[in-house]
Image (cartoon, rainbow, N blue to C red):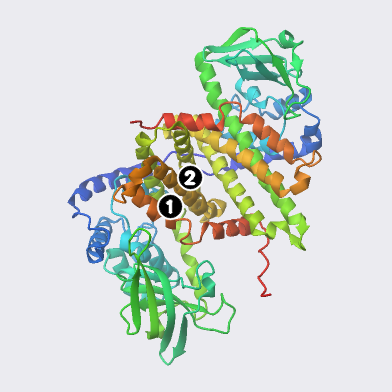
Amino acid sequence: MNFDLTDDQEALRDGIRAVCEGRFTIERVRGGFDRSMWDELAETGVFSLLADGFGWADAAIAFEELGRAVVPGPLVWGVLTHGVVDGVVGGLERPADGLALVEHPDAIDVLVVIDDGGAARVDPSSFADAERLDWPLDFLTPVARVAALPAGEPVADAATVAEWRRQGAVLTAAFQAGIAARSVEMATEYSLARKQFDRPIGSFQAVKHMLADAVVRAEVARTAVHAAAVTLDDPDVGDVDRAIAGAKLLAGEAALKNAKTSLQVHGGMGFTWEVDVHLYLKRAWALDTVFGSAAAHADDIAAGLPVA
Amino acid sequence: MDLRYSESDEAFRAELRAWLAATLPQLPAEPAREDWPARVVYDTDWQKRLFEAGYAGMSWPKEYGGRDAPPSEQLIFLEECSIAKAPYVGVNFVGTLHAGPTLIAEGTHEQKERHLPKILRGEEVWCQCFSEPDAGSDLAGLQTRAIRDGDDYVVNGRKIWCSFGHVGEYGELIARTDPDAAKHRGISWFILPMDLPGIEIRPITTVLGSSEFCEVFFDDVRVPAEQIVGAENDGWRVTNVTFSFERGTAFVGEMVDAMRLAEELSPYVQDPAERRELGHVIAEFDALWALTKRNVSRAATSGDTGLGGLIMKLAYSEARDRLCELSMRVLGRGAFDVHNFYVEERLRTLSLTIAAGTSQIQRNIIGERVLGLPRERQWEPA
């Protein structure tokens, strides 16, 4: 047992971080997702990690970095459907009530729709005329309101979808852990630079304790994500569904709470469009709704425990 | 990242399990919580059995009778003991986990020879005399004095929260040997024989009605000068050397207990909102168990648990607090009876967010050491 990052994993982390810092700067991120981003990520090998012999633990490390840089796009689906569907792929759970909120409707080549029975590919031309929200919560996640998604063409069976749900939860949780970690850093940097009453606001315990709680949440969540990813790679070491549920729950909560903490520490500046904090908070809200919310995962964990 | 135990780890686990299965049924009945003479007998008997089987001093170097086990085996030892409901370390706590490691790091040859074998064999019980009524979170502000007079130090003052003070034969004493020095610099660490004239011990009754802590009063107590550990006035550093001995395993037994308690509470949790809370706290404990493995892994490779070690105490004690609060709500008026184990647990664990660094002090430490935030300005009298 050595539950620390290997040298190769540290190198992978540093490599993806360097790519993000070099190519996915916040200025570019603010321009929104497009095909060139997808192509560059594909070229970096992010989508083909599993096909290239890496494990889910490695993929989680990569997605933490994408989360830190708050890179937009249907990136998780790029990994899940690699080798199954070509092009820029988006995806979602088929909604029970018929109305679907399709993310990145104008940037994707294919929409993969999953349900308990399997996965189907839907041509975006089928919702070309659907209403686009002119004011989406996360302006980097544009959304179309599609009244009725077509059945589409089957591309994967129920067993594959079950795997995609696990894998998607791990990668999304990793991205959320990245949001949580970067939010603490941004808030800490601001709390050192911002002076009130002639001293950095980070010296005040009221602020310091918020940041301490935030870094604890980020680190605990990150560890949970790593444990879930390792268990997905090697299911003998634990209860994979419980590990994944815990990771998505804790990472989702850490992303939300830490982005919110960051906004509070940034004070009035945190309330502005100009400062990047809201990009993290809004993405955190958006990501809690996919691959199981924190609340749904808590319920699932409890459902696995003894009852009277 | 790998969560698989090695073959030698698994062999150790199997051997330990077999020993626990054979040994635990032979133990005498556990004494009543407040029957301290019987508890000393029971706890030291367990320590002696551990010693004879080669499981005493898992982290201690071999030359002092320890096992010098790799951190993964220390983790397995604590995990298996807790799963098997083996006796708690009890009155051996201070000796085996704090005083012993301090002597290993800082004691003279004579001090080591005199005390370490007896601590490991369960023949010597230790207590801790650190906190004072006016020195809690600000421990270095302690005022108990030990002033050199001939071959002795003369100790005057008062200590509080002395774990096992009324049953300890020896105490870890920190006292001010240079009243004029800066507060961290004028402190020394002593091996204190608890039967010296001038020592008065009064048990403290906790919210649980328990008396494992005492107040200790010193009235011109003459401690022989050779009882000092480390150099005079270097006691603050000596006090802080023990933490590396934990190798990331500090809360393993507690964690295993907490996870079991959460699972055993489950059948009584019927309200959907409370079941959701239970699921949440289970996720937290699972994550902290993973963090324990990370800390142990880091201790094995670099000797330092880093950020994970610093956050463990805060994260664990706060999660345990949430579990206990949930259990009280689930019990409702069933919580009126402290014989209910969950109620006793709620009362006992109220100390977790206070003892050995309050959660607020932990947040200061994390804010300052991990995040690099400045200390808050010193208070100035108006």
Q: In this view, does A223 lie to the left or right of B325?
A: right
Q: Answer with mark 1 or mark 2, whichever residue precedes in sequence.
A: 1
Secondary element at image label 2: helix
Query: Is the C-beta separation of discs 1 and 2 under 8 Å?
Result: yes
Q: Which amino acid does label 1 sit on?
A: Phe
- A2, above or below B104, in the image: above
| Numbered circles on residues, count | 2
- In x, y percent, where is residue A82? 63, 20
Say whether residue A250 is visible: yes
Q: Residue at 38% x, 59% y: name it.
A: B207
Q: Residue at 46% x, 73% y: name it.
A: B132
Residue assigned mark 2: B288
- In x, y percent, where is residue B7? 37, 41
Q: Quadrant of residue B373?
A: bottom right
Q: Is residue B174 left or right of residue B307?
A: left
Say whether residue A230 is visible: no
- In x, y percent, where is residue A203? 68, 60
Q: Mark 2 lies on which chain?
A: B
Residue assigned mark 1: B251
Q: Mark 1 lies on which chain?
A: B
- In x, y percent, where is residue A185? 69, 48
- Which residue occupies the foreground of this view, B113 or A278? A278
- B248, above or below B144, in the image: above
Q: Label 1 vs label 2: CA separation?
A: 10 Å
- Which residue occupies the foreground of this view, B269 or A17? B269
Q: Is residue A106 left or right of residue A58?
A: right
Secondary element at image label 1: loop
Q: Residue at 76% x, 29% y: name it.
A: A139
